[in-house]
Image (tube, grey):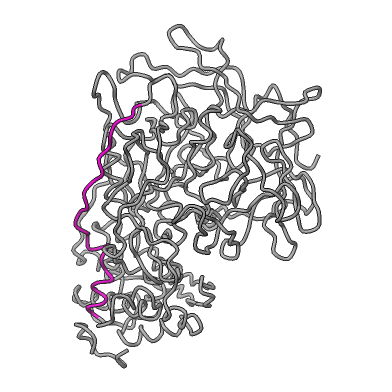
């Protein structure tokens, strides 16, 4: 028999740091294995049946098949990712972790001198940041090694052969059940403790949340075609009630949620970012505020960490670095909160957005198409976002739940340095489905607005630059659709004069957002030509392929902004600041600085909301001189390009899209 399972078997079988010296996010667990090709065994398996692999492994290790399928769904949604590792070194449908194989030093996705605070009233801080040393791997990052011991299968096969990977997961579940002193029961309800332990979580709250998700999937059932074209089904078991008392015997520590602002349905711990003074009156790494009493919170910004959990937590605890409100762990969805919602974290590179938002960092790498985000992390993040949206009355749409790559440059000079995470491989449709707000058609065909909505798995535009500049990235599903100057893929891509002031062409580099739209974003229709649709984008007519049989956008309803009568062009802004008359004595007037774009006569742009001109003056560690300045000028947020922008309400008229 293979290994040490003693049970009888049926048959053996791009934040940019504030320091120019920041070259890496963490040397602890960064993953360089991008664009990994499937092994021969993985290719051979793709023509077989993943469903039968689950059945075989379940019978061999006496694990209920529904438990094995449920765990795998929460780990990977049954995808194999062609043998490539996740951000935390997880492989295959069971997400067996082998971080030692994936460890390497890798650069942060965006390097330079941009200040994530994004406020010119305070000098940019550019310290040296030391690269953390590689730490000893926790158990949750080396489950593949244990699976190899239990099954006597080579580690390489567990990494690349989906059937072997499923067997390894079954062996781990059976071992966890035995360690807990529980029988290898045929009743899924008896496996709650083993599932909780399989999560790899250190604490009981995270483990319980993970196990609850698995049992929710088993109760509800799932059916899906995987990334390898395999059809997998988990039949619903609506009467399932797991024996949750097993969690007490799982040997997990308790984590206090005292002080955290998280829903009860997630595991959350307080790891504070330091508000400390250093140097000659300088300080970091956030500002004390009084939100939402004095300022409204209007946005949630989704980031990826460009580093792994251990290294990123060290960074946010460094007062000379930047900050964000929450970090989410890939392996199990565990959450750490760092900055209270009342305070202002330095995360978006735009002070106006920082002052009105909460920032969530997700363990991941935007340029790694197969360094995939786990289902556990997606679900945990969705729970947190729903909680924040309810608490602060934030609409659940793409105008208020922004990617970091949707945050505008506050001024013309900052546009080229703005970040591009979470990038094209973040599955926005799946994320909003988990939020309870999936994107769908909301108007009759031919209406004046569209919602971008490609099929994530089928939509696989070619990107370059994931590993080597100019070289193609591995094929992968994407949330983004490419834009052309004419209804023809051979025509030039749409240009972004803010990103490339000299008029250079846009590229298909994974970090180039100059000619892209993303799932859930809404744009005003500018024309149609056969299977092509044109939208207004950065002041231009931009075309994307939108075939009727496989659409990449659907009809939408809503409001659009267009220049008022008599105006041939309207300035576009990256921040909504008050008029100069609103500033009291002692607070320097902030320039209402237009970006290099124009909203031209006859053009229309989808409206996301209306906000007052507002500026939070907070240039000092001492909070006494801090002030919130609110003007009478109002702005509309519009979907202007890949990033949102603002226009003065006095310059535009807002009308229904169908008018």
Residue 214 left/right relative to 456? left
Quarter of the N terminus within the rendering = bottom left
User: Number of callouts in the render?
Assistant: 0
- Residue 453 vs 525, above or below: the answer is below
Residue shown at 44% from the left, 70% from the top: 37
Say which of 161 and 334 sits in front. Answer: 161
Q: Depth check: 572 or 652 in front? A: 572
Residue at figure coordinates x 49%, y 28% from the top left:
352
Residue 303 shows in this picture: yes
Q: Position of residue 445 (x, y in %)?
A: 78, 54
- Magenta residues, start to end: 125-150
The answer to if 134 sits in the magenta stretch is yes
The quadrant in which the C terminus is found is: top right
Q: Would you identify the image quadrant in which residue 505 lies? A: top right
Image location of residue 34, percent across then percent down: 42, 61
| Quadrant in the rendering for residue 453 | bottom right
- Furthest toward the bottom, the residue is 11
x, y (%) of residue 92?
A: 39, 71
The reply, left or right, for residue 59 in relation to residue 432 is left
State whether residue 613 is above or below residue 155.
above
Is residue 143 located in the magenta-colored stretch of the structure? yes
Q: In this view, does 82 lie to the left or right of 478?
A: left
The residue at the point 25 percent across, 18 percent down is 280
Residue at the (74%, 42%) spot, across then down: 541
Foreground pick, 190 / 519: 519
């Amino acid at each position: 028999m293979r290994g040490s399972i003693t049970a009888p078997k049926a048959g053996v079988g791009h934040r940019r740091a504030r320091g120019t010296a920041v070259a890496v996010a963490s040397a602890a667990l960064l993953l360089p294995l991008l664009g990994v090709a499937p092994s021969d065994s993985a290719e051979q398996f793709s023509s077989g049946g993943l469903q039968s692999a689950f059945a075989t492994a379940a019978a061999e290790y006496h694990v209920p098949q529904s438990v094995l399928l449920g765990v795998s769904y929460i780990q990977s949604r049954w995808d194999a990712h062609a043998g490539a590792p996740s951000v935390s070194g997880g492989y295959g449908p069971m997400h067996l972790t082998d971080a030692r194989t994936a460890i390497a030093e890798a650069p942060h996705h965006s390097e330079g001198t941009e200040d994530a605070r994004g406020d010119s009233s305070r000098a940019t801080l550019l310290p040296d940041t030391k690269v953390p040393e590689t730490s000893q791997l926790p158990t949750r990052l080396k489950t593949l090694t244990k699976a190899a011991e239990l099954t006597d299968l080579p580690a390489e096969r567990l990494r690349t052969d989906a059937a072997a990977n499923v067997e390894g997961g079954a062996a781990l579940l059976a071992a966890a059940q035995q360690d807990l002193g529980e029988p290898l029961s045929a009743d899924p309800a008896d496996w709650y403790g083993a599932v909780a332990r399989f999560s790899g979580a250190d604490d009981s709250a995270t483990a319980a949340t993970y196990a609850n998700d698995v049992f929710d999937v088993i109760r509800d059932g799932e059916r899906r075609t995987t990334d390898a074209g395999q059809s997998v089904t988990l039949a619903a078991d609506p009467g399932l009630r797991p024996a949750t008392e097993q969690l007490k015997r799982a040997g997990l520590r308790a984590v206090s949620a005292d002080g955290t602002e998280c829903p009860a349905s997630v595991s959350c711990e307080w790891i504070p970012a330091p508000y400390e003074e250093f140097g000659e009156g300088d300080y970091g790494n956030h500002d004390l505020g009084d939100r939402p009493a004095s300022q409204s919170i209007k946005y949630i910004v989704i980031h990826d960490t460009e580093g792994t959990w251990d290294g990123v937590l060290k960074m946010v605890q460094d007062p000379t670095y930047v900050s964000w409100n929450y970090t989410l762990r890939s392996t199990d969805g565990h959450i750490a909160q760092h900055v209270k919602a009342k305070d202002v974290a330095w995360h978006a590179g735009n002070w106006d957005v920082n002052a009105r938002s909460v920032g969530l960092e997700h363990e991941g790498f935007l340029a790694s198409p197969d360094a995939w985000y786990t289902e556990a992390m997606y679900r945990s993040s969705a729970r947190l976002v729903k909680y924040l949206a309810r608490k602060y009355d934030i609409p659940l749409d793409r105008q208020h739940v922004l990617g970091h790559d949707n945050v505008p440059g506050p001024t013309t000079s900052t546009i080229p340095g703005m970040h591009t995470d979470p990038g094209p491989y973040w599955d926005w449709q799946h994320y909003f489905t988990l939020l309870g707000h999936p994107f769908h058609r909301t108007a009759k065909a031919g209406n004046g607005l569209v919602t971008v909505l490609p099929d994530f798995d089928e939509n696989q535009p070619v990107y370059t630059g994931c590993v080597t500049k100019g070289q193609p990235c591995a094929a992968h599903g994407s949330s983004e659709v490419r834009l052309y100057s004419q209804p023809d893929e051979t025509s030039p891509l749409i240009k972004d004069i803010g990103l490339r002031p000299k008029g250079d062409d846009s590229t298909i580099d994974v970090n180039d957002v100059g000619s892209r739209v993303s799932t859930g974003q809404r744009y005003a229709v500018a024309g149609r030509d056969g299977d092509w649709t044109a939208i207004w984008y950065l002041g231009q007519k931009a075309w994307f392929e939108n075939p009727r049989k496989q659409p990449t956008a659907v009809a939408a309803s809503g409001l659009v902004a267009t220049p008022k009568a008599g105006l041939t062009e309207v300035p576009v802004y990256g921040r909504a600041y008050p008029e100069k008359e609103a500033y009291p004595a002692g607070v320097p007037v902030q320039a209402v600085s237009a970006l290099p774009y124009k909203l031209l006569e006859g053009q229309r742009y989808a409206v996301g909301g209306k906000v007052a001109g507002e500026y939070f003056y907070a240039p000092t560690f001492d909070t006494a001189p801090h002030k919130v300045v609110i003007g009478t000028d109002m702005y509309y947020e519009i979907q202007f390009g890949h990033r949102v922008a603002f226009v003065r309400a006095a310059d535009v008229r807002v009308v229904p899209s169908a008018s």
